Amino acid sequence: MIEFDRVSFSYGTRRILKDVSFSINADERVAILGESGGGKTTVLKLILGLIRPNAGGIIIDEMEINDKTEDELRPIRMKFSVVFQEGALFDSLSVKENVAFYLREYTRMSEEEINQKVKELLRMVGLEHAMEMIPEELSGGMHRRVAIARSLAAFESKMFLYDEPTAGLDPANSDIICGLIHDLSKNGKGFVIITQKVTDAIKVADRFMVLKEGMIIFDGQKEQFIRTTLPELRIFLSELNLILKDQ
Amino acid sequence: MIGEMEKEIIKLKELVSELQDFYFLSIRGLLGLMRKPFYFKDTIEQMDYAGAGSFVIVLLVSFFLGMALSLQLSAELSRVGLKMYTGSIVGVSIVRELGPVVTALVFAGRVGSGMASELGSMILGHQVDTLRVFGVDPLKKLVTPRIWSSIVMLPVLTIIGDAISLLGGYFIAVYVSHQSSTVYWSSVREVFTFENVFAGAVKPFLFGYLIACISCYTGLSTRGGARGLRRTTTRAVVISFIMIIVADFILTRILLYILGFSV
């Protein structure tokens, strides 16, 4: 589904990614970990073709996307349901209008059908009561849940992409979001979650990739990740050990 | 040494690419109205923000501008016994030059900075990325309505501002400088020739287009959090101010030539 072949990316003179290569299947549940500024969100933007690499190839569903135009990228982006950092809800629209955004833009559904669909999606994330609220009235956790509902409204995607979905949330709200992410992957639809919080990643993902200074320093399954002795992963693992001890 | 040179080359490349991006945004944003989908609701909302929202501030600034100008001219002209020309000089200055320029500066300060900061925060909040993921062209959805609302609303505000400035001039001429009301208005009326009105009417269209393009471009190129947003807003206003003044000079020169004025 997603293939990176020796991808490099720079912002001006600052190198963000160096020769990054990996491949992810559509049914995999992958967490990309790393410190802030390490290039995690850049990876997500490259997958979606929102930015272009300086070198290397990106292949989505056996299609090289490097030289595609915005129009050509549209169907490729529709293969993903995306939840950006902090939800990225449209401030000027209500929760209902945010969730209905794609339905209004791209389908011929009647207002009645749109209402029904929006209610159904908001019920899935436990926010059917918040339909008429505006984003500034929502808590951080509610923001993310509305963003997840909106991403589900968009299209029949093959995979989810989550960018720091639990950043800045308290443990209770983080648990709700992780639960949602886990539930949505039950029908075999995989995801890539980008996060700094190893404790959240461990709850939902099976495969772990760690980015440091623009390079992948670890790529393996959950068991390998927990047992790794790589000194660079000490920070992540010490946090994880505390959690495992508590359990 | 080579590293430094490489950095300079990268900077130069970035500058060229920025100019290219600005050119594309300006053209595609303007022509966006010709291609489906049409975002009429967004355009109306922007017109309301740019036009109705700026109405009071334009009234206030224009009124005091007219009064200050009339006061200065009355004081100076009365020394040489030519007070009766106050109306015509206020009229020419306002209609041909000060009205369009001052209204455009006020518009850039209020509407341009608002556009830049709004688009900047949409970039930082990944809302523009979300639009692109949903298959919506941000230029058509965000830039085209802003460009057209500025092109339509700035000339309207300029006409209103000109009228209010002339009214401000009238108050000073009649109630402070004790001139005849009839003399003031008849000398103002003399100014309303095709050449003067045309020279003043063309400018706001170009200024509106420039302000919207500069503000949208700087907004959409925001990087680096709250500090980046502050930089964006400042940049949008400063560049708009400079471009208004420069464009005004160039346009004045061209219009004087076309309309057959000798300098």
Image (cartoon, rainbow, N blue to C red):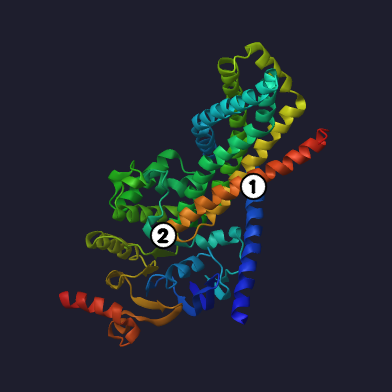
On the image, the x and y values in percent for residue A81 come to 43, 60
Query: Alpha-carbon neighbours of circle 1 within 10 Å: few (<14), some, or many (≥20)?
Result: some
**Taking B171 as reference, is B186 left or right?**
right
The reply to whether residue B58 is in sight is: yes
Image height check: is B17 above or below A116? below
Viewer-closest of B168 and B19: B168
Name the residue furthest bottom.
A229
Q: Could you tell me the amino acid type at mark 2?
A: Phe
Of helix, strand and loop, which one carries label 2?
Answer: loop
Quadrant including the C terminus of chain A: bottom left
Horizontal arrangement in the rendering, residue B74 relative to residue A168 (left or right): right
B231 relative to A118 in the view: left or right:
right
Residue A95 % position (x, y)? 36, 46
As rendered, which of A114 and B92 lies closer to the eye? B92
Same chain? Circles 1 and 2: no
Q: In this view, does B218 lie to the left or right of B246?
A: left
Looking at the image, which residue is at 39% across and 77% down?
A209
- Of residues A44 and B216, which is closer to you in this image? B216
User: Where is residue B155, by image quadrant?
Assistant: top right
Numbered badge on residue B243: 1
**Percent of width and height locating residue B175:** 56, 15
Dot label at residue A84:
2
| Label placed on residue B121 | none
Q: Residue at x 69, y 31 (%)?
A: B96
